[in-house]
């Protein structure tokens, strides 16, 4: 019954005003905004995350005001390929990718005045994307590692690694091309050890590696206001929403009831294949702890700084 309710909510959300606002524009529509010039009253915000960390929650909030549009994974196929070539450092020209997002931000700013563009596929190109798109603000969304790994597991991450015969990069033919590019695996130095890990261990490696890349790049970026957001701090927190509303000049600020209605709309999640930490094996818990300590032990240091 719960799964049926989720499916109904998800179908209804597709017809909501917020969802219609974020329909992916065609290239012919985007190109019309090629000569748009950003003004001082236009604000571009970029959101970075490893995934399964509340970016959809966040874009809903921005998208629920007439002077903002919030989008996440709007061009998921191009974004997945960008992460793929960035992580593996492949010799592929990225100019078209950056042009796409420049055109998209131009369109957003021309129509809605301000735009919040988020994607977990930006995680290995934070410094490069920020330098080229020149946002006014950047966000780092993160969620505690246990819940994140549980969520990735539920989304079937690394469920078919038996197909991996050699070190990456590769094309996984067991699923869609988009999904193939959206899954990265370690390069030669760690690949053999990674193959021996449990699915929980493999997912933990990804979570830690992606967040480390974002965190390291954030520390390099200067002269742009940076926000760190822990999902646990802001989820269902109307007081923090009010601070966001002031900081980003939201028109038609939502009351508490509408705020909860918005964040409770169907998000990018499912209800099957749940595997909670309490059910993990001793080996999975050990791999989790070792990889967190080895790669990204910084979660506790990060503080939500919306004020």
Image: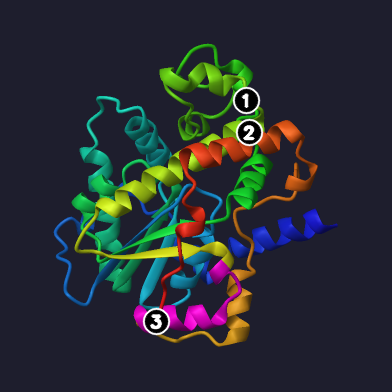
Pick whichever, 11 or 70, lies toward us.
Answer: 70
Q: Quadrant of residue 169?
A: top left
Where residue 276 sits in the image (x, y, percent)? 75, 47
Rounded to the nearest whole Å, what is the CA distance between mark 1 and mark 2? 8 Å
Label number found at residue 287: 2
Where residue 287 sits in the image (x, y, percent)? 63, 33
Q: Which residue is mark 1?
A: 197
Rounded to the nearest whole Å, what is the CA distance between mark 3 and mark 2? 44 Å
Where residue 115 sits in the image (x, y, percent)? 34, 66
Label number found at residue 165: none
Labels 1 and 2 touching (C-beta < 8 A)? yes
Q: Is residue 205 above or below residue 252?
A: above
SS for dot 3 = loop
Q: Which residue is mark 3?
A: 250
Pick whichever, 143 or 156, lies toward us.
Answer: 143
Does the segment drawn in magenta span residue 243?
yes
Residue extending farthest top:
165
| Left-right relation of 72 to 257 | left
What segment carries the magenta color? 233-248
Q: Nearer the viewer, mark 1 or mark 2?
A: 2
Rounded to the nearest whole Å, what is the CA distance between mark 1 and mark 3? 46 Å
Where residue 226 sits in the image (x, y, percent)? 32, 64
Tell me if I can see residue 75 in this picture.
Answer: yes
Q: Residue at x 61, y 43 (%)?
A: 152
Give the colouring mode of the picture. Answer: rainbow
């Amino acid at each position: 019954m719960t799964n049926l309710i989720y499916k109904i909510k998800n179908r209804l959300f597709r017809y909501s005003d917020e969802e219609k606002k974020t329909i992916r524009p065609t290239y012919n529509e985007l190109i019309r905004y090629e000569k748009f010039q950003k003004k001082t009253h236009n604000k571009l915000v970029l959101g970075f995350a490893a995934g399964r960390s509340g970016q959809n929650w966040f874009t809903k909030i921005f998208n629920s005001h007439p002077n903002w549009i919030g989008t996440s994974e709007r061009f998921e196929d191009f974004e997945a390929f960008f992460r793929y070539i960035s992580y593996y450092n492949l010799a592929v020209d990225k100019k078209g990718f950056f042009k796409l997002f420049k055109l998209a931000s131009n369109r957003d700013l021309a129509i809605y005045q301000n735009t919040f563009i988020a994607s977990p596929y930006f995680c290995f190109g934070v410094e490069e994307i920020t330098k080229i798109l020149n946002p006014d603000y950047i966000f780092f969304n993160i969620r505690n590692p246990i819940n994140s790994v549980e969520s990735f597991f539920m989304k079937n991450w690394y469920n078919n690694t038996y197909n991996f015969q050699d070190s990456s990069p590769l094309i996984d033919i067991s699923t869609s091309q988009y999904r193939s590019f959206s899954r990265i695996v370690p390069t030669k130095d760690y690949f053999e050890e990674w193959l021996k890990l449990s699915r929980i261990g493999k997912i933990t490696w990804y979570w830690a590696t992606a967040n480390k890349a974002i965190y390291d790049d954030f520390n390099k970026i200067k002269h742009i206001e940076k926000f760190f957001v822990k999902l646990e701090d802001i989820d269902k927190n109307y007081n923090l929403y009010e601070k966001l509303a002031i900081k980003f000049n939201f028109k038609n600020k939502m009351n508490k009831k509408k705020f909860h209605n918005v964040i409770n709309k169907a998000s990018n999640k499912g209800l099957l294949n749940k595997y909670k930490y309490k059910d993990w094996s001793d080996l999975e818990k050990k791999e989790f702890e070792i990889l967190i300590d080895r790669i990204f032990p910084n979660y506790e240091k990060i503080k939500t700084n919306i004020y």
